[in-house]
Amino acid sequence: MKFLNKGLLVLSFLCLFFVLKSSEDRLLFESAGFFFQQFKLGNEIIFNLSCGMLISIWFYFLVVWLPEKKNKKRVKSNFISQYTEFKRYLIMHIVDACREPYKDELIRNLMEPRAFKDYFKEKVTSDQKRWDVFVNNLDKDLLVGILYEFEAFKEATSYLLGNVQVDDDEVFSFLHRINTISITLKSVSVEDDSVKKLSRMLWEILAGFSWVDGYRDYDHFDSMFNKI
């Protein structure tokens, strides 16, 4: 769609050129030289066709493209805000599970992947990192709260996909994978090893970890969402 819009924009300027070149009104172009001289034949036909095409293209931009662009900007902005809240609530659940006193400033700092990684890789006992404490303290109530956040974010993702045309194939697939992940996480239980799947997913989102590239210093999810 992006390439189509650029093509239509180029075509509109080409039509404008043909309108000016084939126009019977020569007052503005008497000294323009050969470039704006009329064609030898078919000026009236070229003028009418170019005018019709030019009007249609700009009508499309005003009636279709501009409202869609405004709607996309609004939905995208709201979606990114919802992602920020989703991430913040996940971090709150995780920090609460560690059962350590903390201030709101800590939650704000942990929104950054590197800070999150450093904080939860820190050893708090001789044989446990802080992330191990969270996983060991993960009970049914905490799991329900975390899965609820994933379900709410899945709804936000579905709304985005239903109301905005995502031109980037990579981002489109990424958004659908989020929905798939949210569905598969419903089977997670603290009573079996499936909780490890949730732990890996949380670490990937919040610590910026990739099984392919290793640790990233930026929020990969946020980076993908800004390409929408």
Image (cartoon, rainbow, N blue to C red):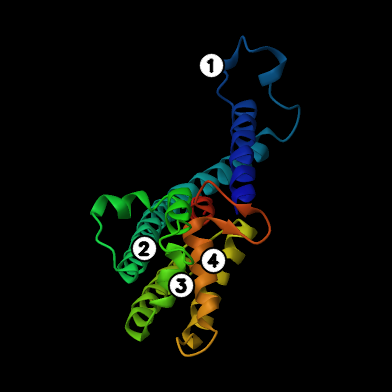
How far is disc 2 from disc 4 in space, using C-alphas?
21 Å
Q: Is residue 159 left or right of residue 1?
A: left
Q: Residue tagged by mark 4?
A: 175
Q: Residue tagged by mark 1?
A: 28
Mark 1 and mark 2 lie on one chain; the one further toward the N terminus is: 1
**Quadrant occupied by the N terminus:** bottom right
Q: Residue tagged by mark 3?
A: 158
Mark 2 and mark 4 lie on one chain; the one further toward the N terminus is: 2
Name the mark nearer the viewer: 3 or 1. 3
Mark 2 and mark 3 lie on one chain; the one further toward the N terminus is: 2
User: Would residue 178 be visible to someone looking at this image?
Assistant: no
Name the mark nearer the viewer: 1 or 4. 4
How far is disc 2 from disc 3 in space, using C-alphas?
23 Å
Residue 123, percent across and down? 45, 59
Q: Residues within 10 Å of mark 3 (few under 14, many from 20)?
A: some
Q: Residue tagged by mark 2?
A: 91
Residue at 35% x, 49% y: name it. Answer: 109
Where residue 109 is drawn, which disc sits there? none
User: Which amino acid type corresponds to the residue marked 1 in the rendered image?
Assistant: Leu
User: Which amino acid type corresponds to the residue marked 3 in the rendered image?
Assistant: Ser
Quarter of image, res 149? bottom left
Residue at 48% x, 49% y: name it. Answer: 114
